[in-house]
Image (cartoon, grey):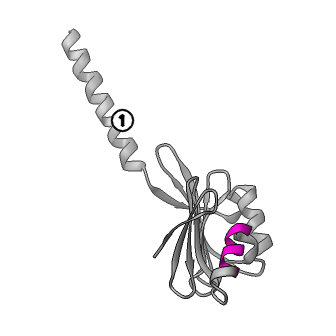
Amino acid sequence: MNRIMRILMIAVCCMMSFNIVANAGNDKPINVKELPPKAQTLLSKHFKGQKVMLATIESGVLSRSYDVVLRNGTKLEFDRKGNLTEIDCKQGIVPSQLIPQPIKNYLKENYKGAAVRKIEFNTKEYEVELTNGIDLTFNRHFQLIDID
């Protein structure tokens, strides 16, 4: 009897693990009003007049994130709290107010005339794609660490 219970417990654990993995990474369309307040504020402040074509929530096993696509093709990604983690302006440039000041200062000194098309933020670095095709990576202290 003890052995049968162990086998059943193992089977149940395997089924639960499979279910968690199968549901990880699911994107679900949501209403803009379901975005975290911080994300809603950023959209209304910096993209006023741009219609949201799609907003989704991606729920993983341990994380949650939000993606927003605007009519002009701009894609924004937010973390679970509504903090901006990526902005990709396929047809335009990233609003200046969304670029950290030290990065703006560096670009003003070294890349006059180039604007930011895409920027990704994470806890360790900032990846910046310029309109001239150059990619720059800054560490969290805004020191340049890579040019591609």
Residue picked out by circle 1: 16
Residue toward you, 11 or 39: 39
Query: Is residue 109 something one can see in this rendering?
Result: yes
Q: Position of residue 16 (x, y in %)?
A: 36, 35
Q: Position of residue 46 (x, y in %)?
A: 76, 74
Q: Quadrant of residue 54?
A: bottom right
Residue 102 part of the magenta-drawn span: yes
Task: Check the picture and name the quadrant holding the N terminus.
Answer: top left
- Which residue lies at the image location 45% right of the left edge and 76% below the top edge? 148
Bounds of the magenta segment: 101-108
Residue toward you, 85 or 32: 85
Q: Position of residue 70 (x, y in %)?
A: 63, 77
Please tell me how crowded label 1 is: few (under 14), some (14-19), or many (20+) other residues with Cα within 10 Å: few
- Which residue lies at the image location 78% right of the left edge and 71% below the top edge? 44
Query: Is residue 100 something one can see in this rendering?
Result: no
Residue 75 part of the magenta-drawn span: no
Task: Give the amino acid at mark 1.
Answer: Met
Residue closest to the far top? 1
Residue toward you, 142 or 6: 142
Q: Quadrant of residue 53?
A: bottom right
Residue closest to the far front? 109
Work out whether 24 lies above or below 116: above
- Which residue lies at the image location 78% right of the left edge and 77% below the top edge? 48
Report the side of 1 relative to 139 (left or right): left
Q: How many marks?
A: 1
Q: Mostly what secondary structure, the magenta segment?
A: helix
Q: Position of residue 120 (x, y in %)?
A: 57, 66
Judging from the image, what secondary structure is the residue with disc 1 in? helix
